[in-house]
């Protein structure tokens, strides 16, 4: 809204005319906390990162707690001590199982001990994916360009009697370039996220964007379809030059749709994290505390389970 | 039900018992010099245990007594007491004109009814004269800043006029100018209020123990009455200050029958800076011609006409406007580019009032009012080719506001000196304008013209209320004001209703000392959408909706008052709960609150939480000296105020932004003689609560891969909302008035010093980097020591 510009001008006036003073007051010393972050999935070993919070005016580097004592429990039974692999990372020798509750406790010197837990739910299956493509040709100044819009309808069946939370990722194979003999050469293809558009009401939240293990996407909940089948609409606009960074048109033949079933903690975390980031420089915004499921500490330990499907396309 | 029957029985017994062999004295009490009516004057019989009454808001009194030789004393603060002795053998009308005390000598001057005698709790009266003696920012006398010095009433951000009563929000104050609600009482973003002290007669603020006649807001009623205009002679004043000039003129239209008053003021910073701007841009190496500035003006006007002793009408109008503007013109080759922008807002309030004495005991006041607040921001830009005459123009305007029409009827029924009844009803038709965008684009190519409006549609609502209030002495020393206020609000096919009981009681332990208690329930159907602490014109008044329920409060208060030799000492404790409060959601900003791609949606509803609970409690002490060479007051408040929302701060209660543990206001006035008086104020307040991150930590971010190297993304940790306190606020203001009688009037030089010891009070705090590149916390302050001078000429 335009008028906000004027408000800023006026506030700017006050800011200029106001008097700035560095405060000598000592901020209350916040109790330093153990910070634990982890993202569990059934295809990799359990790994968490452990660090320590620092004071807001502390200009030193944040410390990783490589000597912390990190214990793993499965359904309240002790499994093992996680082993430090450097940079604050601690690794288990197990991969997590679906529907088991994993509790992680961390002790470190005089800091207050923390614990956190998470359960990976059964992945909600993708029932079907319908695709419709639409070709748009643009002509300008003697050139023409073709954009293909792929419309997707993803059908899922939400679990009854529980609140479910999801994360949708859309990806495809993109070329891997290597610089060989003074030129970039495609040496292969890897799955990489694409940005998708959606007017679907489940995405009526601008704070839903996140990246989980390199998967860009958006989270949503089942508020609109709790316990029912639901079809999500989204679209992807493809232009053959859009990934041809080095003049080589992208070769797309398969799209992947990754539907992640996530715990509520991750959903709340993504929303609060984004809101915190969007508003941290807005002096008029209400402050946002980032969600944490670490008792006595900070951070988030959560995970996801994956339902994957693919769609073959022809871009000739 | 049994209680109701008992109450009604007592009521009728009292009416019957009071009807035997009694006569009524009634009339008006007015200022002898100006003919203005005096509200709150005490009319009593000193030979009958001071049996008496007070004049109502319009100066009317009615006193019933047995057939007897009667002595009638009439007193009012600042006036000489008048005494009359007569034999009361029939109903009698006596209109009394009191002589101002400073015009006479060797007379006894006593005050109004003492604090100890009043039944009301939490009500403080201040005269315009007192307010004018208080030192002020830039010499601009300000009603709202004066009341911030009273206990239980807190200021918001430095220098602003917003006030917070007993832990309530700024939207919970009903500000009435001659009985008409004023929705935005701020000039210059809250640094001055819209009330011109020259046009004001008296002010009262009620913080608790609300009588049933008041409703519609939870926390306070600020009742500001304009002067009526001198019925006897022409008089006026003109003053010149640092930022504004004022003029006031009043006098009779028909002597003793009709009078008028008009006052106006305007700031002139813009006019003074025009030549500087002109010179600056003339010396620039371009073809820009720019003019920008800011001003506000306001006008108060009032006329009244007395048809007879029983009928009198008044018409009062206030209108004012603030405007910030910028005009830019750039000439290049054969083209002229123009750009204009403006930000303006203003109020209009008007009231037509008819006072009618229906009988010796019954007084009727009928009022019809109109109130409008508009906010408008607009830009206009265009290009013209001076050779080809081709042109294109684009204009954008954003308009929001609120408009009210209302009618109100109030009855005062004075059964006996020990029993008065008030009852009445009112109706308000609200039009809320949450924001309209207008776009207009024109050019010599008519096919491309655009003229469209879009935005939130207007919301229309009906609000109505009825009340009954009974002030009665049950036995010697014990008096109570019992009543109820019924109100309803109909909006978008939804009807909200409430019945709010009100009771205040006082027991005189001895003639100087009383104890008091009160319980009040209040309901409020309007919300103010704001998340800044200063009075921005973008603040939006909005009604309750299907989803957003009315705000409600319950307030309990106990207290004691002691009055002696011109001193009033009162102490009050209160406990207030509030429900259905609104608050911006986490992360919401007043900027984003206005942005919507689909502006037909009521986006403001999606920006707020509306299930808030508030708890506020405290103790207030007021020591006030009303008369004498030295007068003023000392006010102290100890209080605590919290808020709790299910989706804010993860459901945990947090301190209200203006939760202020200690608040002190000291006002000191010393009159050296008739020519020189000195004033000083000192304020102290615990720092405002604000939110500050105290820790940083590594977080899971979109860039965290958990591969070989942990991506070091840090975030600030906020442990809870309003977790920190700004440094304490304190400030000393000084002022001196030097008067001199001239041949045709009197001149006054006023000198002031705002923030005399140059305290750097916090406006806001934020993190920044210091000279070593280290993160540091910085405080920003607004006002250093500011001297002021003004000249006033009274004639």
Image: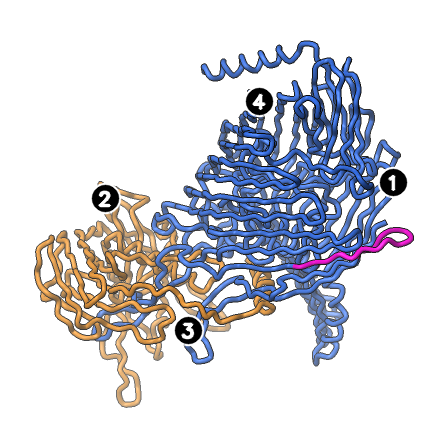
Chain colours: A orange, B blue
Q: For residue B356, what is the image quadrant?
A: top right
Label 4: few (<14), some (14–19) or many (≥20) C-alpha neighbours in 10 Å? few
Q: Is residue B3 visible?
A: yes
Using the image, determine if residue B788 lies above or below residue B471.
Answer: below
Q: Is residue B445 visible?
A: no
Front in this rendered view, residue A234 or B123: B123
Mark positioned earlier in the residue sequence (4 or 1): 1
| B200 is within the stretch colored magenta | no
Tag 2, which chain?
Answer: A
According to the image, label 4 marks what residue?
A: B476
Using the image, determine if residue A221 lies above or below residue A194.
Answer: above
Q: Secondary structure at mark 2?
A: loop
Q: Position of residue B471 (x, y in %)?
A: 59, 24
According to the image, label 2 marks what residue?
A: A162
According to the image, label 1 marks what residue?
A: B233
Using the image, determine if residue B16 lies above or below residue B71.
Answer: above
Q: Secondary structure at mark 4?
A: loop
Residue under the point 80% across and 48% down: B248
Residue under the point 28% across and 85% down: A179
Q: Find out whether the residues at labels 3 and 4 contact each other: C-beta distance under 8 Å.
A: no
Q: Position of residue A223 (x, y in %)?
A: 31, 45
In front: label 2 or label 4 = 4
Mark positioned earlier in the residue sequence (3 or 4): 4
| B740 is within the stretch colored magenta | yes
Tag 1, which chain?
Answer: B
Q: Secondary structure at mark 3?
A: strand
Tag 3, which chain?
Answer: B
Specify whether disc 1 shares its chain with disc 2.
Answer: no
Q: CA distance from mark 2 to mark 4?
A: 67 Å
In front: label 4 or label 1 = 4
């Amino acid at each position: 809204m335009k008028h906000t510009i004027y408000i800023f001008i006026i506030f700017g006036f006050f800011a200029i005319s106001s008097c700035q003073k560095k405060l000598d007051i000592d901020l209350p010393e916040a109790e330093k906390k153990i910070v634990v972050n982890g993202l569990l999935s059934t295809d990799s070993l359990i790994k968490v990162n452990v660090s320590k919070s620092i004071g807001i005016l502390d200009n030193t580097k944040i410390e990783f707690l490589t000597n912390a004592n990190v214990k793993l429990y499965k359904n309240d039974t002790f499994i093992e001590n996680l082993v430090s692999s450097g940079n604050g990372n601690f690794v288990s020798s197990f991969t997590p199982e679906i529907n088991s509750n994993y509790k992680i406790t961390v002790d470190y010197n005089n800091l207050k001990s923390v614990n956190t837990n998470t359960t990976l739910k059964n992945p909600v299956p993708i029932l079907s994916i319908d695709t419709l493509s639409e070709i748009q040709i643009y002509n300008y100044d003697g050139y023409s360009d073709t954009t293909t819009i792929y419309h997707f309808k993803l059908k899922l069946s939400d679990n009854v009697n529980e609140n479910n939370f999801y994360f949708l990722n859309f990806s495809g194979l993109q070329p891997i370039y290597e610089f060989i003999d003074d030129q970039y050469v495609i040496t292969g293809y890897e799955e990489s996220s694409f940005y998708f558009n959606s007017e679907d009401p489940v995405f009526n939240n601008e704070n839903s964007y996140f990246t989980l293990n390199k998967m860009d996407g958006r989270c949503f909940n089942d508020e609109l379809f709790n316990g029912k089948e639901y079809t999500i609409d989204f679209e992807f606009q493809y232009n053959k030059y859009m990934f041809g960074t080095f003049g080589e048109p992208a070769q797309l033949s398969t799209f992947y749709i990754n539907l992640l079933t996530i715990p509520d903690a991750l959903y709340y975390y993504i929303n609060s994290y984004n809101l915190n980031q969007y508003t941290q420089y807005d002096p008029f915004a209400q402050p946002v505390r980032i969600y944490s499921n670490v008792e006595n500490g900070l951070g988030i330990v959560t995970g996801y389970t994956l339902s994957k499907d693919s769609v073959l396309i022809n871009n000739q | 039900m049994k209680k109701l029957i008992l109450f009604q029985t007592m009521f009728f017994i009292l009416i019957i018992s009071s009807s035997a062999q009694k006569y009524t004295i009634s009339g008006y009490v007015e200022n002898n010099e100006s003919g203005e009516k005096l509200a709150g004057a005490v009319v009593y019989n000193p030979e009958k245990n001071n049996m008496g009454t007070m004049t109502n808001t319009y100066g009317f009194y009615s006193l019933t007594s047995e057939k007897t030789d009667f002595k009638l004393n009439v007193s009012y603060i600042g006036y000489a007491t008048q005494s009359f002795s007569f034999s009361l053998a029939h109903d009698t009308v006596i209109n009394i004109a009191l002589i101002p005390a400073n015009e006479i000598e060797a007379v006894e001057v006593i005050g109004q009814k003492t604090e100890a005698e009043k039944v009301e709790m939490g009500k403080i009266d201040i005269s315009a004269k007192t307010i004018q003696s208080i030192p002020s920012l830039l010499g601009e006398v300000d009603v709202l800043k004066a009341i911030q010095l009273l206990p239980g009433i807190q200021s918001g951000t430095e220098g602003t006029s917003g006030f917070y009563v007993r832990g309530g929000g700024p939207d919970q104050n009903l500000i009435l100018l001659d009985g008409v609600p004023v929705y935005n009482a701020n000039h210059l973003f809250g640094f001055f209020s819209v009330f011109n002290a020259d046009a004001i007669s008296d002010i009262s603020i009620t913080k608790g123990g609300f009588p049933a006649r008041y409703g519609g807001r939870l926390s306070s009623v600020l009742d500001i009455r304009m002067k009526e205009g001198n019925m006897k002679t022409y008089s006026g004043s003109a003053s010149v200050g640092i930022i504004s000039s004022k003029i006031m003129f009043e006098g009779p239209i028909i002597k003793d029958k009709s009078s008028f008053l008009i006052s106006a003021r305007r700031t002139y910073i813009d006019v003074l800076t025009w030549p500087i701007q002109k010179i600056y841009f003339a010396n620039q190496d371009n073809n820009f011609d720019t003019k920008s500035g800011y001003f506000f003006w306001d006008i108060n006007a009032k006329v009244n006409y007395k048809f007879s002793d029983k009928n009198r009408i008044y018409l009062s109008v206030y209108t004012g406007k603030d405007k910030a503007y910028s005009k830019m013109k750039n000439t290049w080759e054969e083209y002229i580019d123009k750009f204009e922008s403006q930000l303006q807002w203003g109020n209009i309030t008007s009231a037509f009032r008819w006072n009618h004495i229906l009988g010796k005991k019954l007084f009727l006041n009928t009022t019809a009012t109109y109130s409008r607040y508009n906010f408008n921001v607009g830009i206009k830009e265009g290009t013209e080719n001076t050779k080809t005459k081709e042109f294109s123009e684009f204009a954008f305007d954003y308009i929001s506001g609120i408009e009210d029409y209302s009618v109100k009827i109030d009855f005062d029924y004075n059964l006996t000196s020990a029993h008065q009844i008030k009852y009445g009803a009112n109706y308000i038709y609200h039009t809320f304008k949450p924001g309209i965008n207008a776009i207009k684009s024109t050019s010599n190519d008519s096919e491309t013209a655009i003229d469209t409006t879009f935005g939130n549609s207007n919301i229309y609502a009906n609000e109505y209320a009825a009340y009954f209030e009974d002030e009665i002495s049950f036995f010697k020393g014990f008096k109570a004001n019992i009543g109820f206020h019924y109100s309803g609000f109909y909006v978008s096919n939804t009807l909200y209703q409430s019945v709010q009981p009100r009771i205040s009681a006082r027991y005189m332990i001895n003639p100087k000392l009383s104890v008091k208690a009160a319980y009040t329930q209040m309901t409020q159907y309007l919300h103010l959408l704001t998340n800044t602490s200063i009075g921005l014109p973008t603040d939006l008044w909005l009604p309750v909706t299907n989803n957003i329920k009315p705000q409600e409060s319950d307030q309990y208060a106990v207290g004691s008052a002691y009055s002696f030799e011109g001193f009033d000492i009162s102490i009050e404790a209160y406990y207030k709960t509030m429900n259905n409060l609104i608050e911006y959601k986490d992360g919401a900003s007043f900027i984003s609150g206005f942005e919507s791609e689909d502006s037909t949606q009521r986006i403001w509803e999606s920006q707020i939480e509306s299930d808030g609970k508030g708890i506020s409690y405290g103790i207030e002490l007021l020591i006030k000296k009303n008369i004498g060479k030295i007068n003023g007051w000392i006010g102290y408040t100890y209080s605590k105020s919290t808020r709790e929302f299910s989706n804010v701060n993860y459901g945990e209660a947090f301190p209200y932004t203006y939760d202020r543990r200690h608040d002190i206001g000291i006002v000191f006035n010393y009159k050296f003689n008739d020519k020189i008086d000195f004033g000083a104020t000192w304020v102290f307040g615990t720092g405002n609560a604000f939110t500050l991150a105290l820790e940083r930590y590594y977080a899971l971010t979109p860039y965290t891969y958990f591969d070989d190297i942990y991506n070091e993304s840090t975030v600030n940790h906020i442990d809870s909302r309003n977790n920190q306190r700004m440094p304490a606020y304190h400030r000393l203001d000084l002022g001196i008035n030097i008067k001199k009688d001239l041949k045709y009037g009197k001149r006054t030089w006023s000198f002031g010093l705002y923030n005399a010891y140059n305290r750097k009070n916090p406006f806001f705090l934020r993190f920044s980097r210091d000279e070593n590149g280290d993160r540091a916390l910085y405080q920003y302050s607004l006002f250093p020591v500011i001297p002021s001078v003004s000249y006033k000429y009274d004639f």
